[in-house]
Amino acid sequence: MRHAPHFVSTLGESRRPLDKRDHISAGVIETRVERDRHQDALGVPLAMCRLIVDLPLVRARLARRHEGEGAVLQWHLARSGELDTILEAAAIEDFTVSATDLSISSTAKTVLSTVGWQ
């Protein structure tokens, strides 16, 4: 995830210090089984957020990120629509954040606020 390092560093700017049970991870978990495995591995309950971004914006960002990478870009473009459908149907998140119109730092702050870490 291209923006994950900035997102995580923004989370680190939270006013409340994180303790050893706090873990922030960016990625995709598609099924309840995967979610349960992550939770079991971490040994703490998860607060899982799904960031919602309009698909045309996702695809525009992918086109910029993978410019000149024909086959790679095509895979990511196809996967973005497929993944949106999978995640919508799975509904395994605890909450969502509509991030289409938010900056990376505003998105991070919204996530932190929602889970009570700010």
Image (cartoon, rainbow, N blue to C red):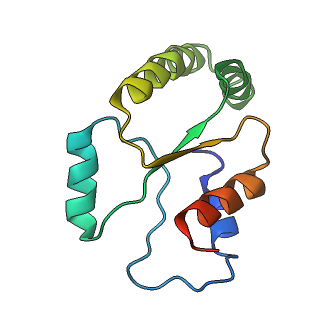
Q: Position of residue 56 (x, y in %)?
A: 70, 18
Q: Residue at x 52, y 16 (%)?
A: 81
**Residue 64 in which image quadrant:** top right
Is 44 situated above or below 56?
below
Residue 9, image quadrant = bottom right
Give the left or right position of residue 43, taking residue 97 as reference: left
Task: Between residue 65 and residue 70, name the one nearer to us.
Answer: 65
Q: Is residue 89 above or below residue 50?
A: above
Classify residue 37 as left or right of residue 104. Answer: left
- Image quadrant holding the N terminus, namely top right
Taking 100 as reference, is 80 above or below it?
A: above
Q: Is residue 26 above or below residue 34?
A: below
User: In the shown orientation, is residue 62 left or right of residue 115?
Assistant: right
Q: Position of residue 101 (x, y in %)?
A: 79, 37
Split into 4 quadrants, where in the image is the C terminus?
A: bottom right
The tally of labels here is 0
Q: Position of residue 60 (x, y in %)?
A: 74, 22
Taking the image as shown, residue 55 lies to the left or right of residue 106, namely left
Q: Position of residue 54 (x, y in %)?
A: 67, 25
Task: Please identify the quarter of the rendering in which residue 14 is found.
Answer: bottom right
- Residue at (26%, 60%) from the top-left corner? 39
Q: Residue at x 58, y 86 (%)?
A: 17
Identify the residue at image location x=25%, y=44%: 34
